[in-house]
Amino acid sequence: MTELATVSKSNSSNLLRRDIRFLGNILGEVLVHQGGNELLDIVEKIREASKSLRAEFLPEMHEDFKQIINALEPDIRHQVIRAFAIYFQLVNIAEQNHRIRRKRDYERTAGENVQPGSIEESVKDLKERGFSYDEVQDILQGLSLELVMTAHPTEAMRRAILDIHKRIADDVMQLDNPTLTFREREQLREKLLNEVITLWQTDELRDRKPTVLDEVRNGMYYFHDTLFHVLPEVYLELERNLTKYYPEHNWHVPTYLRFGSWIGGDRDGNPSVTAEVTWETLLTQRKLAIREYQRIIADLFRYLSFSTTIVEVTEELMKSIQEDSVRVFLNRTPEWRNEKEPYRVKLTYMTEKLHNIIDESKKGTTERYNNVSEFMEDLQIIDRSLRHHYADYVADTHIRNMIRQVELFGFHTAKLDIRQHSQEHENAMAEILAHMNITENYRDLPEPEKVILLEKILNDPRPLTSTYQDYSDSTTECLNVYRTVFAAQEEFGTGCINSYLISMTEAASDIMEVLVFAKEVGLFRKEMDGTVVCTLQSVPLFETIDDLHAAPGIMRELFRMPVYRESVAAMHDLQEIMLGYSDSNKDGGMVTANWELRVALKEITAAADEFNIKLKFFHGRGGALGRGGMPLNRSILAQPPHTVGGGIKITEQGEVISERYALNGIAYRSLEQATSALIKQAVAARTSQRNDLYEEKWEAIIKQMSETSLKKYQDLVFREPEFMKFFRESTPLVEVGELNIGSRPSKRKNSNRFEDLRAIPWVFAWTQSRYLFPAWYAAGTGIQEFYNNDEEKLKILQDMYANFPFFRSLMDTLQFAVVKADLIIANEYANMCSDDTMKDRIFGQIEEEFVLTKGLILKITGENELLDNEPTLQESIRQRNPYVDPLSYLQVQLLAELRELREQGGDDAILLREVLLTINGIAAGLRNTG
């Protein structure tokens, strides 16, 4: 690293510390203003004691610290909790801004150097490797990434709080402006003081669970505020670099990166997501797209003032205006004042046609856009006319960008996926078949008989259902979902919904049932000439370890079936398959889940190759480490390159959405890195970079680790009879369920069984209590089984870490989890257990495994301390811990008080509120929930 770069990095870090100190001082002023010097003094006392304890852990200091916490009076305790929680909110804002600053600093000082992970780096690499224009075009045609927002309840922050954060972030960014006068800086400081006071006086907690439509509106916020503007910029940057390195060609990058959504479509375990709610979701998404286009067109009025007294526009434009004047009635005063400015006249008619889309009386008429292609044609007419009179710079700057937005967002903003549990389909199918006297016991049929029956129904043009037949409410709702999808494709275009995901897919019949229901409403049909039309694909979701093992065989069985193969052919020979990271981890632990997912990826791909079918894998990653969470670019690079040819889908869940997409700069960098990773994977798939022989040996080692790790994990989680009792008593599992962060219940059924507990509260509770158990437990035992204190085998593991991306990603995720975990604090939670013998036995196993895992990570990575290879992240965690710790000790105290009160039949809303505030604060401090 050059001296200049070293100085620049040092200055950059100083600016981060400046911002944190600046915001911390403002918070201190607010504490004095709101609670007096006494509040500030006690917060400072706790902070200093926590820092001292982190610097040197001594038993007597530990007891003194706990005594300070336990001695807090309820009134002051409530304010202390909020002080530490809000501090983390401010630190998170400063760190996010710093990420944007670092990128800008790099671009400003790098000269001709290319930033790692940038789009330019990947395009430059293509050129240096000698890829021709045709080869690059082929690579671009094969790229596909869809990021799918979900309403999974892991965003603990209210929308009102996130809005305040956005305003604070914008203001803090102004601190870097060197042209600010002294007075302007004082005004900026006063503005920030007001925002922090507002934050202090705004309730962090929701007073009710959000409705599904609340969640829809929350999701749409990111499209309105960020994605409509940032996503086209990513495409523009890719085209700019392609032009730079391949200047002899004109580039228009095909649509490879877009966003989808589950919000309003995911009904698995959420009875609030009905067919009517799904329809309202689609209407909400369309309204957003129309409003955005109207806003952009209103802005275009300022720029397209070209006059026919000076320029010659195309006949095509003038003809379209003439046609609009006959077909479109303007019931408001036209916004142009000069008919010699034809672009403004055209934009007025376009605005009216957009407005009329939501008017049912105008449906099917020429007074509205009846599909997005009509709108696109008008934009292209303007684009061609501008270029005709050499206003190509204006066309490139304004119209080209809007054309890209229409390509990306259409009239539906985001593609909506439908998801439902396989059991719901089986129940509905059983009822319908019984009504038709086809079989009275469909549920009890052996799987081969189910498949034969469903295949026969798919080949039979006659319907199974009738509008004159009465069905149960659940079966009626099941059918209504498909009717809604059909109506949606008619109203919003076939691109609005294409995937129907089936949770807990265990057999081929689970997938075929969805296709049968699609046939009932016309989403799947055979034409008279034998042609198959299919506009809704059955997408299996393989979640548990057993399901992952069964997946290749299930898909082969389906692909051999002519009628199913024809349905895939109708979807361009592309089959989407979803893999669940959460339930596989919950089922088998971190090492086994990652290994089994890798095996499934490769074996399902091999199965599809036999039938010349491309696969689009949908990776159901959560935000937390125990649910597959990792940076977006790393999650792409972690896949075997030959498995990404048909495209990738990845879920974006909970707090990850606000972290990645609340600020334009962060969103841009995340999507830029994702694009770079996609191109790198495409190159890797073509150039066979990896040593297959070595990889085969390394995979055999990881398989051995996985088998040992699985036994260790399941011995505790499944075969220790008191494990669930330990989990419920030594974590805030029950209390997490009382936090109003999502419309969906935390359990699939009203039971306390491990199998019925969702993965999100499972991970959330372990994270809150500082164990982070799902993210690392049993890894050490798996590694030790191979290593066995043999130095030669250690060298093999170190070689794998250096040269095998899958193993490196696994180890880096493990060390991130271990460094964030804190078994000293976890022991405080464990002390809440009602049985000391149980506590000592189970916590002892966890602690022993933690020490083993940490030691082996350090041996393999060659680091002195965990995350030495990620110093920025390491420093962030080190700085945060002394501020998170007081919230953890406060949570333990509050949980003990609340539970004791509830055991006696009482309750305390204030006490519960304080518990929930600590949950929010710890989530902000660790930057992770579930």
Image: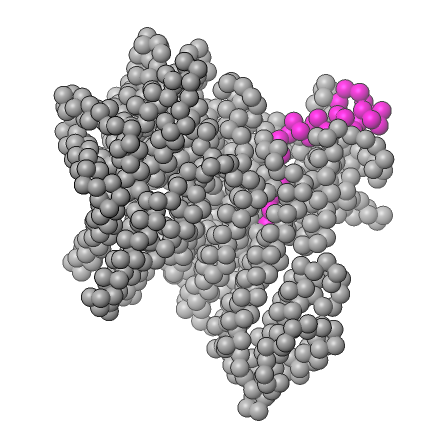
Quadrant of the image occupied by residue 707: top left
Seen from this angle, which residue lies furthest bottom?
309
**Residue 791 image point, x, y percent:** 24, 25
In the image, taking residue 118 as reference, residue 555 lies left or right, namely right
**Residue 906 image point, x, y percent:** 42, 18
In the image, taking residue 743 as reference, residue 381 lies left or right, namely right
In the image, taking residue 37 as reference, residue 623 lies left or right, namely right
The boundaries of the magenta stretch are 415-442
Quadrant of the image occupied by residue 884: top left
Relative to 388, is 431 above or below?
above
Seen from this angle, which residue lies furthest top?
837
**Residue 890 image point, x, y percent:** 29, 28
Q: Nearer the viewer, residue 556 or 758?
A: 758
Please give the name of the residue rendered at 71% of the width and 32% of the height, measured from the top-left corner.
513
**Residue 139 image point, x, y percent:** 51, 56
Relative to 651, is 312 above or below?
below
Relative to 612, is 603 above or below?
above
